[in-house]
Amino acid sequence: GFTHCPDICPTKLFEISEALRAAGDSDKAKKLRALFITVDPERDTVEAMKSYLGSFDPRIIGLTGDRAAIDATIKAYRAYAKKTPLKDGDYTMDHTALVYLKDKDGSFVGAFNIEQTPAQAGGELVGHSCPSRAAPAGPPPTPAWGRSASSSPPRRSCCLRKMVRWRSTIR
């Protein structure tokens, strides 16, 4: 998604926030994470992402990177994103509006059905949550992790994981 999205992104983020809230406060639910990866890294700086995501559940983690890393992520997930000019000289981003659900091992489960009640969605998320927060055995498939040398390798995310070269973790 992207922070200047007028409707779909904030709606989906609200729905994901509600599902995370409805998942409860069990140990499994506390380990759930959702990743929001920008398709507009030119505008979605670390500061912009942090400010934008401050309105949603704190388990939603924002990711940004350089254009090449974002494009590689879009390709890896067979998603679509295209900059579309607006009449006033600004632009918007047309993009795929899917939420990917990953299981506790990081394998793709399917497109997450956010059109269910928050309680149903929360239950589905907990059903696929990680039993632990162990770091992955090795790097994920391309694109490779690209965090700074001083940071530790990212931990395997539980349910909603997309891969990107990390410029920063927003939360």
Image: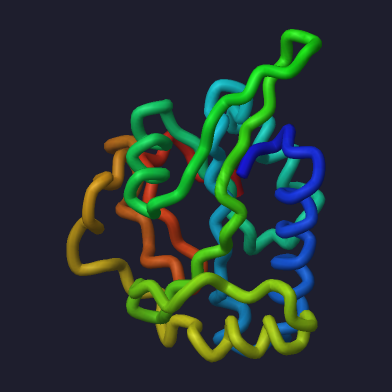
User: Which residue is the extreme one toward the left?
Assistant: 138
Q: Where in the figure is residue 16, as x and y percent of width and height?
A: 70, 67
Quadrant in which residue 84 is drawn: top right
Quadrant in which residue 20 is drawn: bottom right
**Residue at figure coordinates x 64%, y 38% from the top left:** 2
How many marks can you see?
0
**Residue at figure coordinates x 70%, y 37% from the top left:** 3
**Observer-nearest residue: 24 or 117?**
117
**Observer-nearest residue: 25 or 103?**
103
Q: Is residue 130 above or below residue 90?
A: below
For residue 147, say whether it is visible. Answer: no
Q: Where in the figure is residue 162, as x and y percent of width and height?
A: 43, 56
Q: Is residue 54 above or below residue 110?
A: above
User: Looking at the image, what colour scheme do you see?
Assistant: rainbow
Q: Where in the figure is residue 74, as x and y percent of width and height?
A: 41, 44
**Residue at figure coordinates x 43%, y 34% from the top left:** 167
For residue 7, say whether it is visible. Answer: yes
Q: Quadrant of the N terminus?
A: top right
Q: Where in the figure is residue 86, as x and y percent of width and height?
A: 73, 18
